[in-house]
Image (tube, coloured by chain):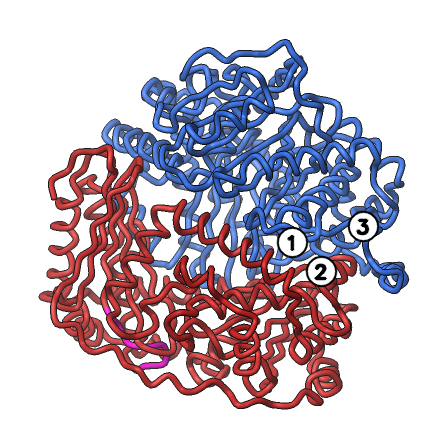
Chain colours: A red, B blue
Amino acid sequence: MRILVHEDHDIPNAVLSLFFRIGSRNERPGITGISHFFEHMMFNGARKYGPKQFDIVMERNGGSNNAYTTRDVTVYTDWFPSDRLELIMGMEADRMEYLSFDPKMVESERNVVRNERLMTVDNSNSGLLLEQLEAMAFMVHPYRRPVLGWAADINSWTVQDLEQQFHKGYAPNNCVLAAAGDVTDAEVLRLARQYFEPIPSHEPPLPVRIREPEQLGERRVLLRRPAELPLEYFAYHVPRAGDPEHPAVSVLASVLAAGASSRLASRLVDHDQLALSVSHWNEISLDPGLLVFSIQPKSGVDPERVERAFRQEVARVRQAGITAKELEKAKNELLTSHFERMKTNSGFADLMGEYELYFGDYRRLFTAAQEMERVSAADVERAANRYLTSKNLTVATLIPENQETSE
Amino acid sequence: MKPNRFRLIPVLFLLAAADAVASAPVKLPPYDRAVLPNGIVMYLVPKHESPLVDLMATIRGGAESEGPGEAGTCAMVADLLRRGTKSRTAGQFSAELDQMGARFGTDVDAQSTTISLEVLSSRIGHATELFADAILHPAFGKAEVRKQRARALDYARSLKDSPGDAAWYYFCALLFGPDHPYGRPPSGDELTLPHVTHADITNYYRRMYVGSNLILVAAGEFDVPEMRARLIRAFSPMPAGRPYKWAPAIPASAPAASRVLLVDRPGATVTNFVIGVPGISRTSPDRTALWLANTILGGGFTSVLNEALRVTSGLTYGITSSFDENRMPGAIGISSSTRTDQTGQAIDKTMALWGGLCEGGFTAEQLAAAKAYVKGSYPADNLQTSDEVAATLSDLELFGLGPDEVNGFFHRVDSVTLAQANAALRNHFCSAVPRFVLVGNAAKLESVVSRYAPQPVNIALSSPGFNPAAGGPVVVSSAASTRPAGAVRPAKRDTPRR
């Protein structure tokens, strides 16, 4: 178990984040979503703290918690008054070693997840479109499957599936613990020795060897749904976090879509007035992931016009590259985002864990700015030509059902 | 989310729970407050957790300073600040701002407009100049006004694509009515925005964006004397003007029987619902007791509502209750979403738990747990980062509250007695008939909603605006069908967790 501590005594509070190296990437067909379901079950009873007591004891002591599952990891975060550090460490150790599965809790939690899926996918045009996009952009890699799981799989998870997940993923050797706030290194280490050291290690999950083959041609998804406004996603396969080209891709994405003066926003939102908003994301990932541009066309605007303008801007950056000014602008934007995440205890804990897991060493957190500084305009142009090709593109479009638009 | 009913918990746990949480001191960081000759109230808060500075300007007024037909004026003014100034086009302004990696944002709420900027400390000189340029010298060019109106209209439409948010706007419209400033979205809607003229915008700006109506806060990594001189230089040219005079408080409408608005979202597999009653103002003497009461009912993960509807039955991903903290009494609302065919079950359970609390009151254990939870989360929510501190100080100044609002917070929480918490519950959660809004598949919900009011109003999600009157007459039933549900207690509205 790797332990990372950041001291900050501004407020009498602290945060613990536990990162387990297991996520939907480690799942097999038929049990998709089990990592996320397991994350829910982590709150439903262990040995010392039985069903419901984890949350009750935590809140009764002024703490609160949350958790999230991604394709690569499952993360549990606790916020608490710093004088409760020992209690919280003990609670985390209890469920890491002794989680149990009360069949009644399994069934009610299954309904919670059904409702979560209904709310964030079925009931959300952007959620549904994203799920379709990822399933189309990846042919074989598990990133094609939703973290929440397919609806049919949600119905069929078993207690045995949960137990297997527990044995695969939940042991100190598969965990990174990040603490931030009003704590000291010595105190965290002493308590970690006391509570986590006695927990036996497990065999970690099997390595994920599958690699997505190179995309050979453009792919498209078209959804027609009741909606007020259309929505379009443009996705390109890009390298994993930690890849030497990752910083250049981040700069490229920023030049195209960060801020009102970015290439896409100034063209589509301001000049052509075709779109209401432009955004982008390039989630860090253990295996190569997607760079996604999201554009909301204005009402009455044919999404095809938006797509044409989008493609022109991409072609322009591939042909002519970016200016020195744009390079500096993107670096400032990325630097500000980086520092913004360091402002809160939980942001800092998350960053430490992310750098340790995705970039191989938490210390790269402190050299990230220099790594970005080394990116040149030529690196960005090269990345644009390598990744922003139509062969590597998946387009997902949502067209309001009630609106007439040519196909 | 929230806690549970402690009487169900084993004795062993009750003993452990009796361990009171120590109240570590919580107080505002050191700051400097000054009033400039033109009336600007200026705060400086040096803070060194990251190499960033936050600037925040607050203009008193907000939604309440707009007339009923002009909702959205205040937000249009705010959105246009960066769309061209006397010396910079919109494009130049964005280019300069982005070049520094700075973030610029505006927000309009019930009583104020907030303009904020975050930037690397090394760029604070140029950033302050841009920030002041937007606030002091916006150009309001005609072409930019037209573009912004079109964007605002589309934004108003896009709210309907987020049914949970939309449900809240419908609820406010139902609770406050179209003549109350809290009854319409502060960003305006499809019915009001077309009427906001160029003259409305420039008049609003001239009247409201004046020194005596402005609160300015800088927080973050900077040298105090330098920052003070920089802000004085940038903001001294602002005319003093006259401070906005707060409108007299208007109560929410008080129908004799419960009202239901059913918003049809054809084909929806989920129902988003909000149920609520009129609440309190930001400065109400009941605010601490109400905060605790809300926490017990629907504030945290182990709240009475979340425990029953999520943890025990899985009827929802989450259910929360919250209350507004505005200048005039605002709303108290319970919101959640559930599968269409379980809508009746979820709402029945909500009403039963709410009614049960109104009848039986809280237990001492519930109150103790709520106090620990509220105190435990307060510092990280209000005092951790530069932008949080800036927002907290602006809030104190805006509402005329002193530093004791923060520094004495733990003491006030500790002092709330069980009788006071129960009084807050009775007086605010249990005394008015509830209003219901359901956004979902109307064809499948009609029989459900008739349980809560005999003549529900049915409108289409796609009809413009949020005002139920726009979709047909609102029928106020004279029959008292639904018993006043009990309590909701305010907290900020939160998305469900995990």
User: Quadrant of the image for the N terminus of chain A?
Assistant: bottom right
Instruction: Give left or right: position of B386 versus A261.
Output: right
User: Where is residue A230 shown, x and y percent of the image?
Assistant: 25, 42
Dot 3 surroundings within 10 Å: few (below 14), some, or many (20 or more)?
Answer: many
Q: Amino acid at mark 1?
A: Val
Q: Quadrant of residue A92?
A: bottom right
Q: Amino acid at mark 3?
A: Phe
State whether the magenta stretch is mostly helix, strand or loop: loop
User: Where is residue B345 shown, x and y percent of the image?
Assistant: 60, 38
* Tag shown at residue B410: 3
Give the Cα separation between the discs numbered 3 and 2: 27 Å
Q: Quadrant of residue A132?
A: bottom left
* Tag shown at residue B458: none
> Can the viewer see residue A348?
no
Mark 3 touches mark 1? (CB < 8 Å): no
Residue, disc 2 = A52
- Residue shown at 13%/63% (left/top)? A218
Residue, disc 1 = B311
Dot 2 surroundings within 10 Å: few (below 14), some, or many (20 or more)?
Answer: many
Q: Quadrant of residue B282?
A: top right
* Front of the two marks 3 and 2: 2
User: Where is residue B290 shown, x and y percent of the image?
Assistant: 75, 36
- Residue shown at 37%/72% (left/top)? A29
In the image, the segment drawn in magenta is A237-243
User: Where is residue A134 shown, x and y percent of the image?
Assistant: 29, 63
Mark 1 touches mark 2? (CB < 8 Å): yes
Q: Is residue A374 magenta?
A: no
Judging from the image, what secondary structure is the residue with disc 3 in? helix
Give the Cα separation between the discs numbered 1 and 2: 8 Å
User: Which chain hosts label 1?
Assistant: B
Q: Amino acid at mark 2?
A: Lys
